[in-house]
Image: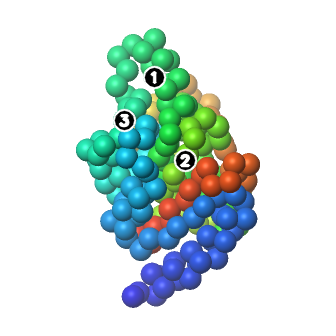
Amino acid sequence: MSYIEESYRKASAVLMKKFEKRGMEAFYCSTKEEARSQILSLIPEGSSVTWGGSESMCEAGVRDAVCQGNYTVIDRKSAGTPEEARALYGKIVCADYFLTSTNAFTKDGELINIDGASNRVACIAHGPANVIVLASMNKMCSSVEDAVNRVRTLASPPNAIRVGADTPCSKTGICGNCLSPDCICCQILVTRFSRIPGRIKIVLCGEKLGF
């Protein structure tokens, strides 16, 4: 075990208690394969499952496994018209499970997410019966302010490039604090407590995932 791995394992023991005090159930997995297995073990067969944009879930193979499994999959990208998209969103917010990553989290157990279309932050805050968050340990920050800075400095520029957003950061790789029509930093959500115990489940991963 490397020093980083040992550090993550020790930190996760503290973090899981912090999340639990905030009404969120937490788990730790050393690798993305373990994380994938843990996430799938939390979803009963036959459940309706959907997701927000998450490179972490894709890299861990969770989305492929769900699509190939015995679940009712609700894919937000399957809509062909604005009317279909609106009808589909109604199903998404009523899904049994919503899968997502988090842009960052604090050492005190708060989740920080920044979103453009804001469907992801909306579903974390309210709607789906269960939310499963895959969070790699490298996203741990000392405070909410530090977490927001991390997202805008390290996560948003590559994310803007990924989605093809016409923003300053997609051109320079540096946040321009823009008000562009394509801005992907429209909403900032700080999840500090879950009033429904265990609705939000955090799967911490020792392997780097996402941005």
Q: Quadrant of residue 39?
A: bottom left
Residue depicted at x 50% and y 39%:
96
- Which percent across, then down, holds residue 106? 66, 63
Q: Kindly state the secondary structure of the residue where label 1 is placed.
A: helix
Residue at image x 37%, y 35%?
A: 72
Q: Is residue 58 visible?
A: no
Q: Residue furthest left?
A: 68
Please give the residue where the numbered disc 1 appears in the rendered image: 88
Number of labels in the image equals 3
Q: CA distance from mark 3 to mark 2?
A: 15 Å
The amino acid type, in three-letter code, at marker 3 is Val
Q: Quadrant of the N terminus?
A: bottom left
Give the mark nearest the N terminus, 1 or 2: 1
With 145 as the anchor, is 203 left or right in this view? left
What's the residue at 48%, 17% (across, down)? 87
- Relative to 167, is 190 on the left or the right? right
